[in-house]
Amino acid sequence: MRWLASTADEDNISREPTTMGDIINYEKNGNTYRFIASNTSVYEAE
């Protein structure tokens, strides 16, 4: 999500093709995930 926020220009999101490599290169620390219960809401996971 940090990558998406960084590519947005004010209220516009780029429509340029994006690869997973682009996102992985942006997320440098590698710990960009968390295991949560399957019944966790989006709001709790945030």
Image: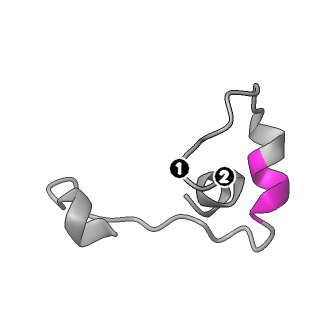
Q: Residue at x 76, y 27 (%)?
A: 16
Counting from the top left corner in percent of width and height, residue 5 is at 60, 59
39 left or right of 27 in image? left
Which image quadrant for residue 37?
A: bottom left
Query: What amino acid is labelled 2 in the image?
Result: Asp
Q: Residue at x 14, y 56 (%)?
A: 39
Counting from the top left corner in percent of width and height, residue 14 is at 68, 36
37 left or right of 3 in image? left
Counting from the top left corner in percent of width and height, residue 19 is at 78, 33
Viewport quadrant of the N terminus: bottom right
Query: What amino acid is labelled 1 in the image?
Result: Asp
Q: Residue at x 59, y 56 (%)?
A: 10
Mark 2 to mark 1: distance in Å?
6 Å
Instruction: Tell me the residue that label 1 is attached to.
Output: 11
**SS for tag 1?**
loop
Secondary structure mostly seen in magenta is helix
Which of 10 and 18 lies nearest the eye of the viewer? 10
State which region is magenta.
23-27
Which of 36 and 28 lies nearest the eye of the viewer? 28
Query: Alpha-carbon neighbours of circle 2 within 10 Å: few (<14), some, or many (≥20)?
Result: few
Residue 9, disc: 2
Query: Alpha-carbon neighbours of circle 1 within 10 Å: few (<14), some, or many (≥20)?
Result: few
Residue, far front: 10
Q: Residue at x 61, y 63 (%)?
A: 2
Q: Is residue 21 magenta?
A: no
User: In this picture, is 40 found above or below 7?
Assistant: below
Colour logic: one colour
